[in-house]
Image (cartoon, rainbow, N blue to C red):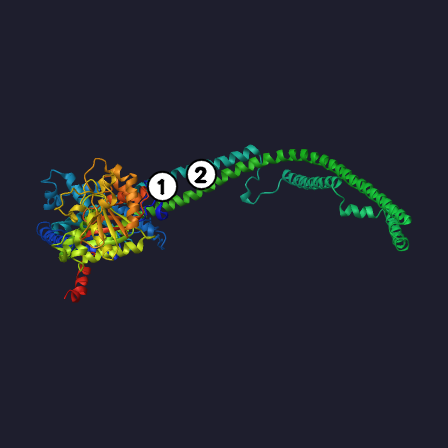
Amino acid sequence: MAKSNPTVAGRMPRPPGTKNAPEAALTPKEALGMLRRHIWLILFMTIIGGATGTGGWYLIRRYLPLYRAETAIKVLPPIDSDPMNMVVAQVQQDIRYGHRVSLANLMRSQSTLQDLLQRDEVRNTKWYRQVTKGGVDVARAVQSLDQNLTAFPHREAEHIQVSMTCGSPSEAALIVNQMVNLFLNQHGETEKGDVRQKLADVTKRQSDVEQEIRQCEADLQNVTRRTGITDLDRSAGRYFQHTATLRLNELDKQESDLSLAIKQLQADIENLRQLAEGPVTEQIQHVVEGDPLMVALAQQVAVLEAQLSGQFTKFGETHRVVRQTKERIEETKANRERRRMEIAEQTRRANLMNARDTLRVLDERLTELQKMRAAALEEQRKLDDARSEYETIQKTRDERQETLSQIKMQIEKYRILLEDPETPKVQSVGLAPEPLEMVLSRNMLLWVPGGTMLGLILGLSLALLVEMLNDLVRTPSDVRRFLRVPLLGVIPDAYEDHAVDDIDLCDVVREAPYSLLGESYRRCRTNLELSAGEPFKTLLVASGQAGDGKTSMACNLAAAFAAKYERVLLIDGNLRQPSLHIAFPADEQSDAPRVGLTNLLMGECTYHEAVSPSAVAGLDLIYAGQPVPNPAELLAGHRMKELIETAAKEYDRVIIDSPPALLVSDVKMLARLADATLLLFNAGTTKRGAAERTIFELEDVGANLVGCVLFGAEAMKGGYFRQQFRAYRRYLKPQRA
């Protein structure tokens, strides 16, 4: 029965722009299959790479030989050793390594390389004439040295490894030795020149310090004469404490004690003020309780409460006498509370007033002390200024004398360093010998395996590129990875199955039942029945483009259902390019024109007149009929819906062959009327983008897309049907025999 709800089986149409589900990762089996399909390309590129590496090794070794000569320079710790001290100072490893790095960079600087090229021994080499083109292009020689002359500082050893690479072993050794000799001479002169400059600077500094010491002595005598104080020099042991200092210390002590007493009294006044305004404390409460009147009132309350207890027993709670006694008790308690408040208030106010009077007296005393201290402080300031000036000049003189002693010692050290052979901090460990073997880059074990490996990598890259550029839906894994519909069957390529060589592809199920193609159609029929959520009567077979094989699929699927003794009606819904009359040709001896779906939809014939029997038992046909200018309007009319409803009542299965979904809109009308839609992808022509657009088009109209079928799948190397073909033939061989 035709469906009317556009969201069949609870599937809502996906809005445009919704992304696909995440792609599944490439499995190891699929990767191995990809390699097997392109194994010859990979082997070819690997052989080409090995041959290129071998040829390159021979040509370079024959025409571009390279030799490397090496020697080393010993680098001493980067500190000026003290010749007066026998203990050697220890320098951190990182600092020593940094010094070696700086020396290596200095050796390879442009100025050093240019100085090396100025030497006659280097200019007379064959290497110099080749790189400078006869002595013209000196900049090219500097660039060649920068590339081939290396100075490598060892991190652990105290050496800089110097090496030169060129085509002649003797010239490589000569250039290295010339560079080491040049660098040692330049660096030695630089270091000794620095020592001479430092010696001259220190000698001049000695004269300046001696002049400053003489000036300090004169300033000390001037201070003594100006102030008239003879005990300014404390370091001589004649210092005594002045009377002004003693008086100032005494006044400071008295002022400090008085200030502390005032602060304490102010804190007590604040506490007393808070006590006067706040609740009664325990101390005040103790004073209040000692008042005679408070004691008498307390005794009176105790007597009345004793009387009240006896009256309760004798008269009861509501008696007049009892009430009078209670009133007297309450009145006595009230009087006692008033007395307590009066005594507490008087006591707190008296304490606060006494504290404030004491504070005024102390403030007056503090003012007087401050005046006396100011006078003593002025006298002490004059004394301190004189002593401070004297001590400053004296300290400056002592510092200059100590500095003069250090300068004299430094002058002696620089004189010793100037004559020390280790002052340059760099030493040669020997001349570089001529190399006996070429460098490693000319080794065959590097070129041949390297070329082979590069060829293999290039072959693998090309194979991966070919696979990535191929965007066809070729294998079931492609359907699973890139599409969102379940795969209900795979129909192999007819060229792979020799059992159907002379058989029309629309008659495979009938005429080649033991072929792998026929079994694939029957498997698709079974999967279609099992995968559908609800039993369906009408099935639409659709594809995205023309020529994908949907007519062959519809015909063989109809024959497969008819083989189950079901009554099947096959309708040619492709009114633009019908093909059902080719697969099932009608009886040409009849003079009556062939009627079909268009005649039925236009009302030119009845339903039974449009149905034609076929050569297959249980299978009836409705051809497309005569061509019409408006096929989409006819399929969208009510007669098409009535036709499907009527056919669904009379037949077990109604299968509709449709036009391409991406080319015309007819299939959308049929998809809304069918119970289920089966989508067909051709492994040789359908691209992933076209497959996704086809799914979008059908889902947007609410088609019940139960699954898809991969048509024309090839048996690729490492692919799908290679082993299945062999296993299927072996399995059916006894039955065919």
Residue 287: x percent and y percent? 81, 46
Q: Is residue 75 left or right of residue 278?
A: left
**321 displayed left or right of 120:** right
SS at mark 1 in the image: helix
Callout 1, which amino acid? Answer: Val
Residue type of the residue flagged with mark 2: Ile
Q: Position of residue 324 (x, y in %)?
A: 90, 47
Q: Residue drawn 42% across and 43% down?
A: 403
Residue closest to the eye, 283 or 119: 283
Question: Distance of mark 1 from mark 2, alpha carbons?
Answer: 17 Å
Mark earlier in primary sequence (1, 2): 1
Instruction: Say which residue label 1 marks.
Output: 202
Q: For mark 2, what is the residue?
A: 213
Looking at the picture, how far across and down is residue 483, in whole percent? Answer: 28, 48
Between residue 3 and residue 275, name the one nearer to us.
3
**Could you tell me if the residues under marks 1 and 2 are in contact, i.e. CB atoms within 8 Å?**
no
The image shows residue 265 at horizontal and vertical percentages of 71, 41
Task: Tell me, for residue 468, which label it has, or none.
Answer: none
The quadrant where residue 254 appears: top right
Closest to the observer, 516 or 361: 516
| Residue name at image x 59 percent, y 36 percent | 383
Badge count: 2
Of tags 1 and 2, which is closer to the observer?
1
Residue at image point 55% right, 42% down: 234
Q: Quadrant of the C terminus?
A: bottom left
* Vertical side of 220 occupied by 66: above or below: below
Q: Is residue 379 visible?
A: yes
* Residue 549 can be seen, yes or no: no
What is the crowding at mark 2: few (fewer than 14 residues within 10 Å), some, or many (at least 20)?
some
